[in-house]
């Protein structure tokens, strides 16, 4: 939108597979609280396309290279496009564990973020599927929302004596049994099943799971990742390759629609400034 309002020619290549496609609601986004992500995206697209210099292509970007000062992108349909600037707003791919029912519940009752989903599961019996540092990161925020909290470590708990005392002080149970399945109805969790055959009723659980970059083109073009696996960007959302920018979930642990929109707004302004200065 920022580039369209600056009369810059923009092509958006979208494969239509956002990581939040299964999430029933988007929260913590002013003016859009409780709205389905798909509805937000559809409204955004309709507003952006009001600017005649912006166009959309439903396709999948497969390859990229640079020659003669331009970046070239080839798509699944065999088309090729070139431009002096590239923006990767490609997000990440969550890597689901091999736990029956987990993927069906992801983004619905098995969630990643207390800011996006925590209010909806407040006061409910909640798990944290994580261990060590990741579990300790989530525990205080989850405990703020419910006093019915358990940490599911799926193996020996990785906490020192001080950490164990803090968890006990906050009445947070630790369950070391391996999780083997999640029983649910249309994505809404009812029981967590353990490898010993036992199961326990839960309403929801947080889960800290690994991810990969949804698109590998930036790395193939030379963009560096940071030690957490995100695209390395500066305050202007410039990657380590001149002319390539990145915004949204592929750059930060703060995964939310609101943050993605804000970073995209910044990218548009920076690109327009660079193009304007070059033409002046």
Image (cartoon, grey):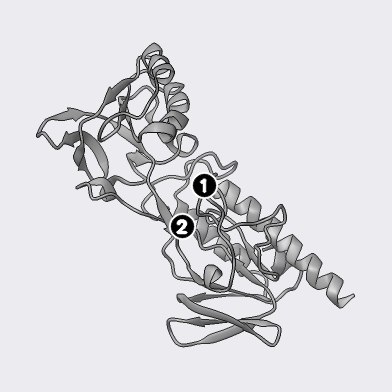
Q: In the rendered image, which quarter contains the C terminus?
A: bottom right
Task: Answer left or right for 10 relative to 172.
Answer: right
Disc 2 from disc 1: Cα separation: 10 Å
Q: In the rendered image, which quarter contains the N terminus?
A: bottom right
Furthest toward the top, the residue is: 169
Q: Residue at x 32, y 39 (%)?
A: 109
Task: Identify residue for label 2.
Answer: 92
In the image, residue 23 lies at what x, y percent?
39, 48
Kindly tell me whether residue 183 is visible in this rendering. Answer: no
Q: Residue at x 44, y 49 (%)?
A: 36
Judge by depth and name the residue closer to the eye, 211 or 183: 211
In the image, residue 76 lies at what x, y percent?
43, 81
Kindly tell me whether residue 46 is visible in this rendering. Answer: yes
Secondary structure at badge 1 equals loop
In the image, residue 270 lies at what x, y percent?
75, 62
Task: Answer left or right for 258 relative to 203.
Answer: right
Marking on residue 255: 1
Furthest toward the left, the residue is: 197
Marks 2,1: beta carbons within 8 A: yes
Question: Which quarter of the picture shows residue 161?
Answer: top left
Image height of 211 relative to 141, above or below: below
Task: Answer left or right for 194 relative to 113.
Answer: left
Question: Which quarter of the picture shows residue 232?
Answer: bottom right
């Amino acid at each position: 939108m920022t580039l369209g309002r600056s009369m810059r020619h923009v092509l958006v290549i979208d494969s239509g597979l956002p990581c939040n496609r299964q999430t029933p609601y988007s929260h913590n986004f002013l003016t859009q609280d409780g709205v389905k992500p798909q509805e937000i995206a559809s409204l955004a697209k309709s507003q952006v396309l009001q600017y005649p210099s912006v166009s959309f292509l439903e396709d999948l970007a497969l390859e990229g290279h640079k020659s003669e000062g331009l970046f070239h992108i080839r798509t699944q349909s065999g088309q090729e496009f070139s431009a002096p600037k590239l923006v990767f707003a490609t997000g990440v791919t969550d890597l689901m564990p091999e736990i029956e029912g987990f993927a069906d519940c992801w983004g619905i009752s098995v969630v990643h973020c207390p800011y996006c989903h925590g209010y909806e599961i407040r006061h409910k019996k909640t798990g944290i599927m994580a261990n060590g540092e990741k579990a300790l990161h989530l525990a205080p925020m989850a405990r703020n929302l419910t006093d019915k909290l358990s940490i599911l470590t799926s193996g020996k708990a990785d906490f020192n004596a001080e950490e164990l005392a803090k968890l006990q002080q906050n009445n947070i149970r630790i369950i070391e049994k391996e999780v083997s399945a999640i029983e649910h109805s249309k994505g809404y969790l009812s029981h967590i099943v353990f490898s010993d055959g036992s199961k326990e009723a839960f309403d929801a659980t947080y889960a800290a799971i690994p991810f990969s970059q949804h698109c590998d083109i930036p790395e193939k073009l030379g963009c560096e990742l940071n030690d957490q696996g995100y695209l390395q960007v500066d305050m202007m959302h410039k990657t380590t390759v001149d002319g390539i920018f990145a915004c949204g979930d592929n750059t930060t642990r703060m995964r939310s629609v609101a943050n993605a929109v804000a970073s995209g707004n910044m990218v548009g302004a920076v690109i327009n400034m660079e193009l304007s200065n070059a033409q002046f």
